Image (spheres, helix red, strand yellow):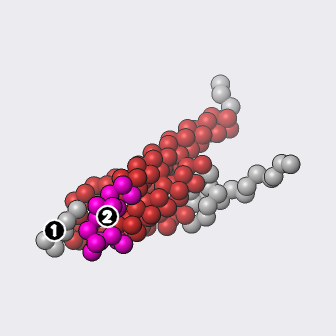
Amino acid sequence: MANPTSSGRATHARRDLIGRALVGVAALAAAAAALDALWSLGGAADAIKVVSAWRAYGLLVFSALFTLLAARPRAYRGVWEVVIFHKLAMTLTAVVYQVRGGVADADTIIVADGILTVALVSAYVLCRGWSQRPAPPARG
């Protein structure tokens, strides 16, 4: 019969791996979207160049945040909650705009940020992102 403690650790390790993979995929998707947005900056109309740059740089920031969370999911107190808030807020904002008569790209935001919100919440639960573990001691 397997040791219940080692079985529990294996379950936590599997959940952690799945959660980290979810947020890792989110990091890659955000990086790809950032590259696409950066590539498109040159062709953006003058009226939206600054907003387009803001979006591109924001996607790079989110890619970096997701990468940090994937690497050490319990090391960044509050980061999970901040990124989940942002993605949920974007999804709900797009839903409101869509209901009020449709705004360009609202449907795309609903799908993309909605899926991302579900993935992030799932990863947060799987990785127990609310629990803080002290960093291992430095070796040197």
Image coordinates of residue 80 in percent, x first then y, are 52, 61
Location of residue 132 by image quarter = bottom right
Which mark is drawn over residue 91?
Answer: 2
Does 140 sit left or right of 47 as displayed? right
Segment tinted magenta in the rendering = 38-51
Which mark is drawn over residue 102?
Answer: 1
The front one of 13 and 67 is 67
The front one of 112 and 85 is 112
Label 2 vs 1, first from the N-terminus: 2
Image coordinates of residue 103 in percent, x first then y, are 19, 69
* Residue 44 sits above or below residue 111 on the image: below
Q: Is 92 included in the stretch rendered in magenta? A: no
The kind of secondary structure element at disc 1 is loop
Work out whether residue 114 can be spotted. no
For the N terminus, the image quarter is top right
Amino acid type at mark 1: Gly
Q: Residue at x 27, y 55 (%)?
A: 111
Assess disc 2: are there few (<14), some (14-19) or many (≥20) residues with their C-alpha within 10 Å of its C-alpha: many
* Residue 21 sits above or below residue 34 on the image: above
Location of residue 84 by image quarter = bottom left
Which mark is drawn over residue 111?
Answer: none
Give the CA separation, mark 2 to mark 1: 14 Å
Q: Residue at x 21, y 71 (%)?
A: 97
* Residue 79 sits above or below residue 18 on the image: below
Q: Residue at x 40, y 62 (%)?
A: 56
Location of residue 114 by image quarter = bottom left
Amino acid type at mark 2: Thr
Does 58 sit left or right of 109 as displayed? right
